[in-house]
Amino acid sequence: MKKLEKRKSRMIMEIRYPALLAAFDRRGIVLDEVRSEFKLKIEHWKCESVAVHFADNFDATSKQILVDHLRSFIMYEDPATEGEFKDDAIRFVKALKKVFPSELSNIERLGVRHISIFEADHLKSYSDALSLVMKKYFQSNLPISIKPNDCRATFVHDNGMLTVGPRAIVKSGV
């Protein structure tokens, strides 16, 4: 079976929390802290209501950060390495903790998503596509230290899209 050719990837870390009333008054502190950490990579910013939005280029965004009263995220499209994203996500969380030192003690959800877009013109049937995805991504022993609890594959074709998932991952001894 032929290999998949990766066209694009996106990595996202998102934190959701109960409404932070302090976010309304600390937009300037968010600007100071986040800009000081990321000014060389993500130099542009704008405030939209309570949200502070950072991007490397608002017309063609490949790196962006958002901080508002209900959630915060960092998103990189086609990062140089996974390590770059991981290190920057940690720096982002540390900057958030400086802005909201006591308010972020009650996080409702922290999620990390890794989205990859592959081109697979050689696949001619749903069964072939599903078989390739299952073989590549749903192994019983994933080589990572976290245990994913859901996953989704979306197949885009000439007539639309087909989404399979979320699918529970069988817990393994990883």
Image (cartoon, helix red, strand yellow):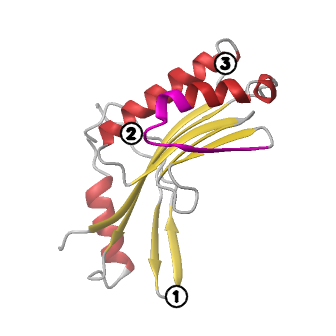
Q: Do tag 2 and tag 1 residues touch (Cβ < 8 Å)?
A: no
Earlier residue among tags 1 and 3: 3
Let me know if residue 45 is in the magenta part.
yes
Q: Secondary structure at mark 3?
A: loop
Q: Quadrant of the C terminus?
A: top left
Q: Residue furthest left?
A: 1
The residue at 38%/34% (across/down) is 86
Residue range in magenta is: 35-48
> Is residue 49 positioned above or below 60 on the image?
above
**Left or right of 114, for residue 105:** right
Give yes or no for residue 26 being in the magenta stretch. Answer: no
Check disc 2 and report its element: helix, strand or loop.
Answer: helix
In x, y percent, where is residue 17? 69, 29
Q: CA distance from mark 1 to mark 3?
A: 47 Å
Marks 1, 3: nearer the viewer: 3
**Hey, what amino acid is under mark 2?**
Phe
Q: Would you name the residue on which mark 1 appears?
A: 159
Where residue 100 is drawn, which disc sits there?
3
Q: Is residue 28 visible?
A: yes
Q: CA distance from mark 2 to mark 1?
A: 34 Å
List the residue tagged with mark 2: 85
The amino acid type found where label 1 is placed reads: Asn
